[in-house]
Image: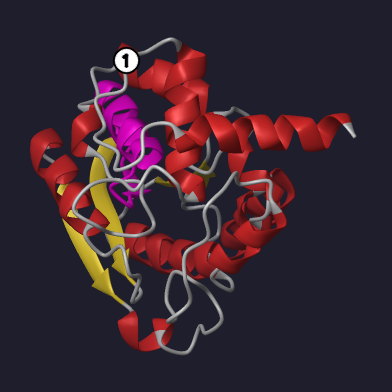
Amino acid sequence: MKTYLICSGGLDSVTLAYRLAHEQSLKGVISFDYGQRHKKELVFAQKCASRLGADYYPIDISAIGKNLSGSSLTDDIAVPDGYYAEENMKSTVVPNRNAVFLSIAFAIAAAKHGDSVAIAVHGGDHFIYADCRADFIDAFNKMEQLSLEGQCQLLTPYVDQDKSEIVKDGVKYNVPFADTWSCYKGGEHHCGRCGTCVERREAFALAGVDDPTIYEDNSFWIEAVNRNKAKKLR
């Protein structure tokens, strides 16, 4: 099998890259410049491809990204701090992002005679990202089966798992966690306060795995997680 992986350079997609490489199916790594403020993630995607000996496809869709307005990831809007389940995290939604990424990735995979496209959406994304949920994934896969007459399938092995399970998978496949980038703020180090930093920090804790990441704020994640737990009890 020849699999083309959509890779942001983050913990989830890099872990999936290592898993696919272990299974000897990883052929190509595809990453997207859509005008995101944390563009440095692309450096980590390229490192991943290089380490694993996969073809690398950096796709510049920043011209499209300029028109996907209203997100704190692409506009001059502050990236919110807090837990992903909080209402303010909805500002990180980029309209139809995964649908755009997947459409391009399937086209590349088909042109290169690949068998599958993989994306590391996971259960923790379901709160606010509709294009990470299982029903979207199933519908998109059906559409591509029609479009490409069954040539390529969509692989989403983490769609029903939480991020701590991905960390455990990363340990299994010897993922260099320090060479992954999650933070939405794109600073010198992970901020430790945005939703994806909080989620990352919590995942390592739940998995019982040492987190090698350098955070500007090492303790905020505990406050954010506890605040979310308190809301659930109300």
Residue 37: image quadrant is bottom left
Q: Which residues are magenta?
A: 1-25
Q: Which class describes the residues within 10 Å of circle 1: few (<14), some (14-19), or many (20+)?
A: few
Could you tell me which residue is drawn at 46 percent across and 51 percent down? 194
One can see residue 92 in this view: yes
Is residue 119 visible in this depiction of the protein? no
Residue 69 appears at what percent x and percent y? 52, 85
* Residue 84, percent from left and from top: 61, 46
- Magenta residue check for 111: no
Q: Which residue is found at the position 34% from the left and 88% from the top?
A: 63
Give the quarter of the figure containing the C terminus. top right
Residue at coordinates 33% horizontally, 50% vertically from top-left?
7
- Is residue 214 or residue 13 the one in the foreground? 214
User: In which quadrant will I find the N terminus?
Assistant: top left
Relative to 204, say whether 58 is above or below: below
In the displayed structure, would residue 89 be above or below residue 138?
Answer: below
User: Is residue 23 shown in magenta?
Assistant: yes
Classify mark 1: helix, strand or loop: loop
| Amino acid of disc 1 | Asp
In the current view of this chain or complex, which residue is farthest to the right? Answer: 234
Return the residue nearer the eye: 45 or 25.
Answer: 45
Closest to the observer: 180 or 79? 79
- Residue on which disc 1 sits: 210
Q: Position of residue 13 (x, y in %)?
A: 37, 41
Up the image or down, 99 lies above or below 192; here it is below
For the residue pair 213 and 125, the one nearer the viewer reads as: 213
Would residue 67 be found to the left or right of residue 21 on screen?
Answer: right
Q: Identify the residue at horizontal 77%, vertical 32% (top origin).
A: 230
